[in-house]
Image (cartoon, grey):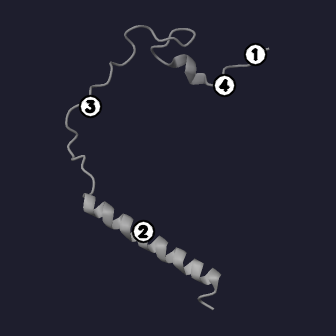
Amino acid sequence: MSGPNPDPYEDKITGLEPGGGVPPGETPPGEASTAGPQGHDEGGPRKGTQVLWISIIGVVVLLSMLYFIGYIVGFFD
């Protein structure tokens, strides 16, 4: 037992063969290559900026560890 087609617009799509196939020549052409320049530089931040942020994060982590270790040992009672 089959019911009616739930998508009434499916039968009115142009370029489809019965069964849903696409005939030759109906597909769009392949996309163009993007190997040319894209209009922007691909450079990231300078090396010094990366080292600065890693150093800042390392200092914050180290100070946090020292604080919690000191709290556990009883240094901050």
Type of amino acid under label 3: Thr
Above-or-below relation of 26 to 34: above
Disc 3 is placed on an element classified as loop
Cα distance, mark 2 to mark 1?
65 Å
Q: Which residue is mark 2?
A: 57
How dense is the environment of label 1, judged by Cα within 10 Å: few (below 14), some, or many (20 and up)? few
Looking at the rendered structure, the kind of residue marked 1 is Ser
Q: CA distance from mark 4 to mark 3?
A: 40 Å
Circle 2 SS class = helix
Among numbered discs 1 and 3, the one appearing first in the sequence: 1
Pick the residue in front: 51 or 7.
Answer: 51
Residue depicted at 38% across the width and 71% down the height = 56
According to the picture, the residue beneath numbered tag 3 turns out to be 34
Give percent across and percent down for residue 12: 52, 18
The mark found on residue 13 in the picture is none
- What residue did someone put label 1 on? 2
Q: Position of residue 24 (x, y in %)?
A: 40, 7
In the image, residue 43 above or below residue 38 = below
Query: Label 2 to label 4, Cα distance in Å?
Result: 58 Å
Q: Is residue 23 left or right of residue 28?
A: right
- The residue depicted at 42 percent of the width and 73 percent of the height is 59
Q: Earlier in the sequence, mark 2 or mark 1?
A: 1
